[in-house]
Amino acid sequence: MVKQFLRRIFSSRGLEEEAAAVNEPVDAMVEDVKIEKQDAMEWQRPGADEPAPVGQTAPDWPLDSPLTLIINRDKIEKHNYKEAIQLVADVFQNIEQGLRRSGRVRLSLDAHLVDEMDEFLGRRLGKYIEQLEQQTYDLTAFIDWEDDETVSIYEHFVLPSQSEKQDDFFRSRLILIYDTCGALEWDYQPVARRFAQALGFVLPQQYFVDFEVWLGSLDKAEEDQAANKTLSEKPENVETAAQEPDFTHMIPFQISREEVENEDINKFERFFNAMTAEEMERKKGKIVFSFYGFAGEVDDLVNNRSVNSWASLLIEKYPHIFYFLNDEYVPMTSFLTSLVVTANIEGEEIHYNEEELAELSSFIGSALQRVAELTGEDGEQLVREFESKLHAKF
């Protein structure tokens, strides 16, 4: 399935592109659940006194007021998502810090855009909002589904009018909601129900049962695909360390802008300082980390001085981190390398400063050799694996 922490790094890839690789082989295994449209007089939105699905332990909510994202024609035409990306990142961080219990992000149209609205512009507006959901990733879960203007905009311009497209539409949005809620340790079902109910639909409990079965099918398909790839690519006469059954599982780290600016690597210190030699091989190839609180694309992170300094400190203290990076879904090795070596991203290709790369490779190679001494692996093989991942495409 689409992983929330991966999306936050590579948000521009879009939901359809990432899901396409796994949807096709499992769709035949999943029984579609139809969503029933309610009569407009039969449903009511949750009242203001209804308990929030999360945040019950926090005593105060100083930032729990609604936030409005105004959409104008200039943003649509220039595909400008930076304001939305920053707003959603701030909301995510505020929720984690206990300053906010829900997103309450509202959509509003600029007055000039309303005056100019026609069918063609309406379609462009709908596509823009869909891109906002993909670029920010967490927006769908954070939208204020009790705000009339927001619901009206979303229903009129984003929700497909054709009933045959609505099942796939809801499923794609539930993936976004599910992953965001998972990252914040929320129960995703109340959020999903608010989303559907605002648009006049009912999600029965069986829908969630089948949805989770579908997600499990995606995970199983990915595991089988990864296992088959590993077997097919295994070189002859080369012994590899036995992997535990859950070798595709990941250990995610989410790094805030505040941690970056303070050069705070405490999360990794706790991870490495508590690790025994026996645990190293079990945790090989499992780390994926991402940044939040930053606007823009991957190359904006690559060229951010604060991020560069933070990553340099991390690698200087823990050069053996490359042994633990997971490159199965996202090229984490080349991503982390690009944060400490001068790099230029052109499309999906990455080009490093060769002199800096050679210096880093020597440093990391020595660290991997030391890891091999502890795990009993072939040090030269670890170095070759590291070098083979350096130019993975983004």
Image (cartoon, rainbow, N blue to C red):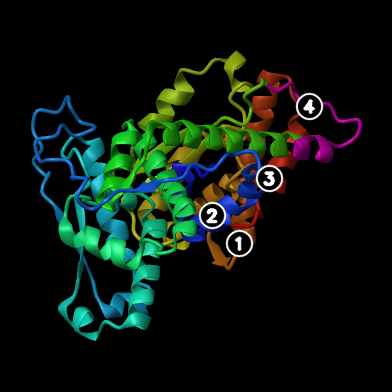
Amino acid under disc 3: Pro
Q: CA distance from mark 2 to mark 1?
A: 8 Å
If you read the primary sequence from the N terminus, does the residue marked by circle 3 or circle 4 appear first?
Answer: 3
Position of residue 361 in the picture relative to residue 303 (left or right): right
The vertical placement of 256 against 231, above or below, is below
Decide: few, some or many residues near mark 4? Use Cα within 10 Å; few <14, some 14-19, many ≥20. Answer: few
Q: Which residue is mark 4?
A: 240
Question: Which label number is shown at residue 338?
Answer: 2
Q: Which residues are magenta?
A: 228-243
Q: Which residue is mark 3?
A: 25
SS class of the residue under badge 2? helix
Q: Residue furthest bottom?
A: 116
The vertical placement of 306 against 3, above or below, is below
If you read the primary sequence from the N terminus, does the residue marked by circle 2 or circle 1 appear first?
Answer: 2
- Report x, y in % for residue 350: 60, 62
Depth order, front residue of 101/337: 101
Quarter holding residue 58? top left
- Report x, y in % for residue 46: 17, 41
